[in-house]
């Protein structure tokens, strides 16, 4: 069971301190998976990258809240992204990059509860097929 308050609190502190964490997320994603950077070569104005961040936030908030659409979106996007050149097992790398960027932004304020809850959330997402 995810502790929604811990996840929501993380997102609130990130928003306060960093505003849009999109650039931090992509630095993390491309450091971990350099081959993915070239998939965005057509995204010259950054709209696709911004939409992914937006949908990532929506999925996380829905999953820890009402959970109306998150499992379906993750399942559908996991399959759709396979056609973009993102193997199903690497789709979760984006959520991992989000967590890692948030951990960087929070620095000393990243708590053991955050570490535990984000690990649980990422494991739950990875199990959605
Ligand atoms: C390693 C993980 C991921 C990579 C490398 C990746 C890559 C991409 C690429 C290259 C596109 C553009 C495809 C095209 O138009 O030809 C795209 C679109 C999109 N991705 Fe991802 N993606 C990843 C994970 C995710 C995740 C976790 C989500 C959200 C749950 C997501 C949501 C979207 C959305 C909503 C679009 C459409 C954006 C638009 O056209 O405005 N992606 N992705």
Image (cartoon, rainbow, N blue to C red):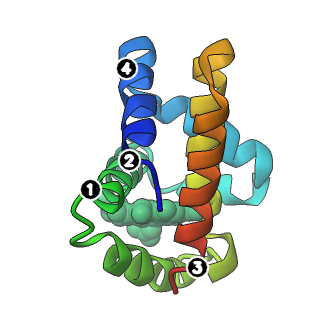
Which secondary structure lies at badge 4? loop
Q: Earlier in the sequence, mark 1 or mark 3?
A: 1
Would you call the spot at circle 4 few (<14 residues within 10 Å), some (14-19), or many (20 or more)?
A: few
Q: Nearer the viewer, residue 24 or 60?
A: 60
Q: Which mark is residue 19?
A: 4
The structure residue drawn at horizontal position 65% and vertical position 59%, both measured from the top left corner, is 93
Q: Is residue 129 above or below residue 62?
A: below
The alpha-carbon separation of the residues under discs 4 and 2 comes to 21 Å
Which secondary structure lies at badge 1? loop
Asked if residue 1 shows in the view, the reply is yes
Judged by depth in the image, the label closer to the viewer, 1 or 4, is 1
Would you call the spot at circle 3 few (<14 residues within 10 Å), some (14-19), or many (20 or more)?
A: few
Q: Earlier in the sequence, mark 3 or mark 4?
A: 4
The alpha-carbon separation of the residues under discs 3 and 2 comes to 18 Å
Judged by depth in the image, the label closer to the viewer, 3 or 2, is 2
Judged by depth in the image, the label closer to the viewer, 3 or 4, is 3
Please report contact status of discs 3 and 2: CB closer than 8 Å, yes or no. no
Quarter of the rendered image showing ligand 1:
bottom left
Please report contact status of discs 1 and 2: CB closer than 8 Å, yes or no. yes
Q: Earlier in the sequence, mark 4 or mark 2?
A: 2
Image mark count: 4
Ligand 1 is within 8 Å of the C-beta of the residue at disc 2 = no
Q: Which residue is mark 3?
A: 127
Q: Which residue is mark 1?
A: 65
Q: Which residue is mark 2?
A: 4
| Residue 74 position within the rendered picture, expressed as x and y whole percent measured from the top left | 42, 74
Would you call the spot at circle 1 few (<14 residues within 10 Å), some (14-19), or many (20 or more)?
A: some
């Amino acid at each position: 069971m995810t502790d929604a308050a811990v996840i929501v609190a993380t997102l609130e502190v990130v928003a306060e301190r960093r505003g849009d964490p999109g650039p931090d997320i992509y630095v993390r994603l491309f450091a971990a998976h350099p081959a993915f950077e070239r998939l965005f070569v057509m995204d010259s104005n950054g709209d696709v990258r911004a939409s992914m961040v937006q949908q990532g936030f929506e999925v996380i908030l829905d999953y820890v809240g009402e959970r109306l659409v998150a499992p379906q979106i993750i399942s559908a996007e996991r399959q759709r992204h396979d056609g973009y050149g993102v193997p199903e097992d690497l789709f979760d790398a984006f959520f991992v990059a989000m967590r890692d960027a948030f951990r960087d932004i929070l620095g000393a304020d990243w708590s053991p509860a955050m570490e535990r809850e984000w690990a649980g959330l990422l494991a739950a997402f990875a199990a959605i097929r």
